[in-house]
Amino acid sequence: MNAGPEISQAFVVCVSAVFTQNILLTYFLGLCPFLGVSREVKTATGLGFAVIFVLTTTCMLNWLVYHYVLVPLNLEFFRFILFIIIIAAFVQLVEMVLDRYSPFLYQQLGVFLPLITVNCAILGASLFMVIRDYSFIVTIGYGFGSGLGWFLAIIAMAGIRQKLANDRIPQGLQGPGITLIIAGLMALAFMGFTGVLQAR
Amino acid sequence: MNNKTDAKKIIIDGLWRNNPVFKQVLGICSTLAVTNLVLNTVVMCVALVFTLSLSAASVSLLRKFTPRNIRMMIETLIIGFYVIIVDLVLKAYWPEMSTNLGPYVGLIITNCIVMGRCEAFGNTNPPGPTFLDGFFNALGYSFILLIIATIRELLGMGTILGYPMPYFSGPYWDKWIIMVAPPGAFFMLGVVTWIFRSIEIRKEQNTK
């Protein structure tokens, strides 16, 4: 078995998941926390790191479960429920482990972990990985890249919103309205990366 | 009599006063992606109306038997159950649509509006009103999405539901490709939120 080409494919998929196919700006996944928690850079960073970690690990777990349990049993349609259970259970586990062994990390990330269970980016990435038929190594790259892309987007957004905090914005546009329009501009900017990399 | 006014209040709340999209800003995550074509949006909205109203009603039916600390998990399972039904029906009878929508059907599970309504309304109310609440919240959600989808498809492709429109598909109209690309969705949703919130604010000022 030659892992060379797979690793390079994983790398390409990872980079394209960060830039050209950003999970937030091109697939609209994880928008709710993106709008809700992007007021400050500090909290956005915490949430971003938690997403990177959970996204990468749950993608791997879900891949294993899907290919070694669901496919042999012909239960593919059951994946929605199983994925969400795995994600919820994993998040719970991480929370308990952090609480027990690393109070510092727990303080930093603890609040965000329950939020992550209902973050569509996590489930979305797992479903994309099934639909696109990635191999295990590529899945690792994809999960990490997606998380990193989400992290970048939310931090950039939080920075912009901090700058905007004192600006005068029409009353109807305050809050979600202006955030969505900024997200649109960011999506435009990220579209500029298309063509740099062509990978699925 | 009392019942009637209650129902009316639920309907108005869902459709307008507490509209899921521009008021609560919930659940836009998974469905924004399908608004580039009206047809996709219609299918997605039907799926959402089905899932939201029935799962909220089921949550409410089971509310007395559900232990409080595993409530969220049970709700997720109930929602997942209905989403699987939608997914299987689509796969069986309309495979092209199923591939068009991709993972977004499955993502109804994490659509915050479904969970939000189950939590906020289904947990404390009997099944009848809950069903109504879910149904009209989903409708309030759908009509905004349909507005967005219509504008995006018209400006971006010059068609509505795949049929070419007189002026927009002609040679005098430069198609706005950006409208069918992801940024267009963000802009449209931002502008729609802006417009509807401004109307709401103006109405409030007038009543004062």
Image (cartoon, helix red, strand yellow):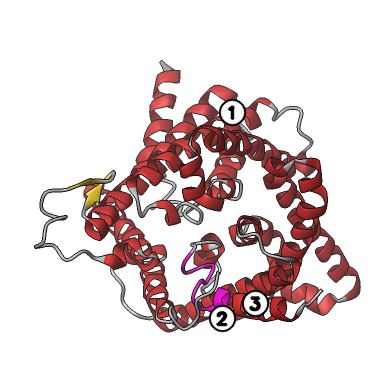
**Is residue A85 on the magenta stretch?**
no
Locate residue B20, reporting x and y percent.
44, 47
Residue found 54% across the figure and 29% down from its top: B130
The vertical placement of A43 against B118, above or below, is below
Viewed as shown, does residue B143 lie left or right of A86? left
Q: CA distance from mark 3 to mark 2?
A: 33 Å
- Same-chain status of marks 3 and 1: no
- Check the picture and name the quadrant holding the N terminus of chain A: bottom right
Which residue is at the front of the view, A5 or B141? A5
Mark 1 Cα shell of 10 Å, populated few (<14), some (14-19), many (≥20): many
Q: Amino acid at mark 3?
A: Gln
Residue at label 2? Answer: A41
Residue B127 shows up from this direction? yes
Q: In the rendered view, would you say A153 is above or below A23?
A: below
Q: Nearer the viewer, residue A147 or A166?
A: A147
The location of residue A110, given as percent across then percent down, is 75, 68
Label 3 vs label 1, nearer the camera: 3
Drawn side of residue A144 relative to residue B107, left or right: right
Helix, strand or loop at mark 3? helix
Residue shown at the point (56%, 43%) measured from the top left: B114
Mark 1 — on which chain does it sit? B
Contact? badges 3 and 2 (CB < 8 Å)? no
For badge 2, the amino acid type reads Val
- Report the disc number at residue A9: 3
Q: Is residue B176 above or below residue B1?
A: below
Q: Which residue carries the number 1 mark?
A: B57
- Check the residue under mark 2 and report the chain it is in: A
Residue range of the region highlighted in magenta in the rendering: A15-26
On-image quarter of the C terminus of chain A: bottom right
Residue B101 in the figure: left or right of residue B35: right
Q: Nearer the viewer, mark 3 or mark 2?
A: 3
Q: Position of residue B7 (x, y in %)?
A: 43, 25
